[in-house]
Image (spheres, rainbow, N blue to C red):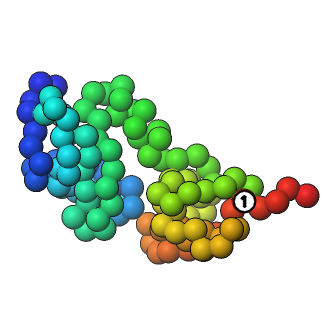
Amino acid sequence: MEKQIHTVGERVEKFCAICQEERGHVVASVTKRGQISRVSCPKCGTRSTFKSSTSAAQQGLRAKTGAPYDPKLTYRTGQSMLHPSFGQGEVTAVIEPQKIDVLFADRLRRLIHARAQS
Ligand SMILES: [Zn+2]
């Protein structure tokens, strides 16, 4: 299984953090050894890294899940977070120095970030 060679355009099952569903993803890039490195979701278009080994998958899942949302942190586009009410989200745009658009499973929400500590 681990030694399987993959090619770009192939379909792989992966859980999409944006769609909140397991679905067939399209392989977007592979390593020289034929291992899948990036896949894209055909529904939402989100590209994510794909790790084949178990330990790396767990680490990848951890990184993908993101840290809990903290308004004091400064977020960047593409960063993932876990909001206590809205769940898993990904920053789609930095609107103003202290406002970000975050795509959650249900819809896009505007959140505060980089809030100055008083
Ligand atoms: Zn998706």
Give the quarter of the image for residue 114.
bottom right
Residue 89 visible in the displayed image: no
Q: What residue is drawn where x is 9% and y is 30%?
A: 4
Where the N terminus falls, by quadrant? top left
Q: Residue most toward the right?
A: 118
Q: Amino acid at mark 1?
A: Ala
In this orientation, which residue lies closer to the viewer: 15 or 8?
A: 8
Q: Examine the rendered structure and indicate whether residue 43 appears above or below residue 65.
A: below
Mark 1 vs ligand 1: CB under 8 Å? no
Q: Position of residue 117 (x, y in %)?
A: 85, 56
Q: Examine the rendered structure and indicate whether residue 110 appears above or below residue 20.
A: below
Relative to 101, is 63 on the left or the right?
left
Where the C terminus falls, by quadrant? bottom right
Q: What residue is drawn where x is 82% and y is 60%?
A: 116
Relative to 86, is 29 on the left or the right?
left
Q: Examine the rendered structure and indicate whether residue 36 appears above or below residue 82.
A: above
Label 1 crowd (10 A; few <14 / some 14-19 / many >=20): some
User: Which residue matches tag 1?
Assistant: 114
Q: What residue is drawn where x is 66% and y is 55%?
A: 74
